[in-house]
Image (cartoon, helix red, strand yellow):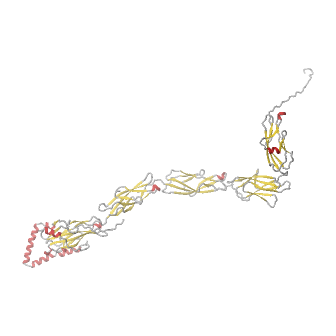
Amino acid sequence: DGGSPPLLGSATLTIGISDINDNCPLFTDSQINVTVYGNATVGTPIAAVQAVDKDLGTNAQITYSYSQKVPQASKDLFHLDENTGVIKLFSKIGGSVLQSHKLTILANGPGCIPAVITALVSVIKVIFRPPEIVPRYIANEIDGVVYLKELEPVNTPIAFFTIRDPEGKYKVNCYLDGEGPFRLSPYKPYNNEYLLETTKPMDYELQQFYEVAVVAWNSEGFHVKRVIKVQLLDDNDNAPIFLQPLIELTIEENNSPNAFLTKLYATDADSGERGQVSYFLGPDAPSYFSLDSVTGILTVSTQLDREEKERYRYTVRAVDGGKPPRESVATVALTVLDKNDNSPRFINKDFSFFVPENFPGYGEIGVISVTDADAGRNGWVALSVVNQSDIFVIDTGKGMLRAKVSLDREQQSSYTLWVEAVDGGEPALSSTAKITILLLDINDNPPLVLFPQSNMSYLLVLPSTLPGSPVTEVYAVDKDTGMNAVIAYSIIGRRGPRPESFRIDPKTGNITLEEALLQTDYGLHRLLVKVSDHGYPEPLHSTVMVNLFVNDTVSNESYIESLLRKEPEINIEEKEPQISIEPTHRKVESVSCMPTLVALSVISLGSITLVTGMGIYICLRKGKKHPREDENLEVQIPLKGKIDLHMRERKPMDISNI
């Protein structure tokens, strides 16, 4: 209080906090494992579950019960105390009792959702200790995982295992459970020692992880399992593999620079850097091909020409990143496809052919050779005649030029035509060539006699004509050329008083008087003249009748005509005409002396000779008054005889190609 001195008084105040139900039961674990031996006594507690509720009093009251999912057989075997949570063996364990039981237990609190715990009960028939497995690892082991390289040889040891019975009363056996290339075998000379080793090479690319278990059991049936995990380590044991060992590609010629060809792809089954693939060109690849080492894209940097080279073949390499690296090789086969970039090309710009005339229709004149550097349809060439197609035709396949009709040199000696070659491309390309055809003459025309014009014509020859004087001529022409047109004249038949008095020049056809005409030579002289060429292989000829009437005058033409109409009996004398006729001139000179001898004989006869001379003089004077007009007198009378003036002897001749 406030007095002096102050006095004190004290009392104790107690404050109590009332509990409310704000907590529910909780288990510290979600699962417990329980082992029960087969000879356990009924009523023996095998486990106890306990949940915690932080409340007090009735708020903390917990009751335990089985879940409805627990089989009735398990409930009958194991009793759960609802207040304490103690699980007791409720009945004796028989031989048919399941060895594993799953007991789901609920902790119930007022106004709360039950807490759950699972008790896994394993029933062991005997109450002995199980065998023991003691491993001793040889291979690298970290945290229960054994690491092996995939290239380890067969029979590589992994671990030793000691299998023993803790009580030393029972025999213990073991085996390896699981799949894999492993073997567990007794390791002699020791007892209960086992060696785990590999049985074949292992491949990381096929399987990277294995899990096996060493299982031990004794004669009483107790089992123990020890799990071993094996992880393989990858090694660079795989080379890259191309999808195809032969990579066949195509590209059209005249491609653009840096044209894309393909993307190479190779796989490597190794992992990490060992599986990373780089690409390279082989040493045989041309310099204008490029290959990206990372992407594998293959390109060509220049234009390709199929006509220069159609196929390319070279190697490419795929190299991995291992140490040492591995590689594989593939072959690239590139075919350059054709484009119609070449026109047909004739072997010659101009073709010349020499063909004998009268060549048979559709005979082979010659081959027009043409090529096209392109391939396929682009290289197909069709030939056609541009001009004069009505006369000439060409075989497209063989290029053989033919004439539709027989060709006559006398009508036209040469032909000039143009041949066009068109290929099969789209669009088509073409070219032309000039063809010259020269016709070679063959002896197909006999000489044509132009004079005399008829076998019935005749010429008056005066008796006073001096020897060596030209009387008339035979004129003929030949349509052939060369030696086929060289004409020779000859007399092959004679008829008359003295027809040998006349001769013919084999070159010119001039007929001259050989000897002086006598009184007995008066009358009609008939000369059968043969006009022959020098053709090969056999000459052709024509004949004409030359009629010479020796007389002073023509007083009775009808009489002469009657003589001409009679068929002459002439013996044919086949003599080859001689072109060289120099000896004939000497004969003419000797004959020219005959008038002098005759004159001397006349003078010696005296008066008779004088009378005769006067008579001759008078006749000569009369002849001068008609200025020699009668010397070349001709009477044209139609030919009615059997001798044909223009008779042509045609004989077959072989014609060969030139």
Along the line of sight, the residue nearer the viewer: 2 or 352: 352
- In the image, residue 584 lies at what x, y percent? 22, 74
- In the image, residue 58 lies at what x, y percent? 84, 33
Q: Is residue 514 visible?
A: no
Please tell me how many numbered marks the rendered image carries: 0
**Residue drawn at point x = 12 percent, y = 66 percent:** 627
Q: Quadrant of the C terminus?
A: bottom left
Q: Is residue 385 visible?
A: yes
- In the image, residue 28 lies at what x, y percent? 80, 40
Tell me: residue 634, above or below residue 209.
below
Farthest top residue? 3
Asked which quadrant contains residue 509, the reply is: bottom left
User: In the rendered view, does 2 fall on the left or right side of 498?
Assistant: right
User: In the rendered view, does 197 fall on the left or right side of 288?
Assistant: right
User: In the rendered view, does 353 fall on the left or right side of 572?
Assistant: right
Tell me: residue 239, above or below residue 65.
below
Tell me: residue 331, above or below residue 609.
above
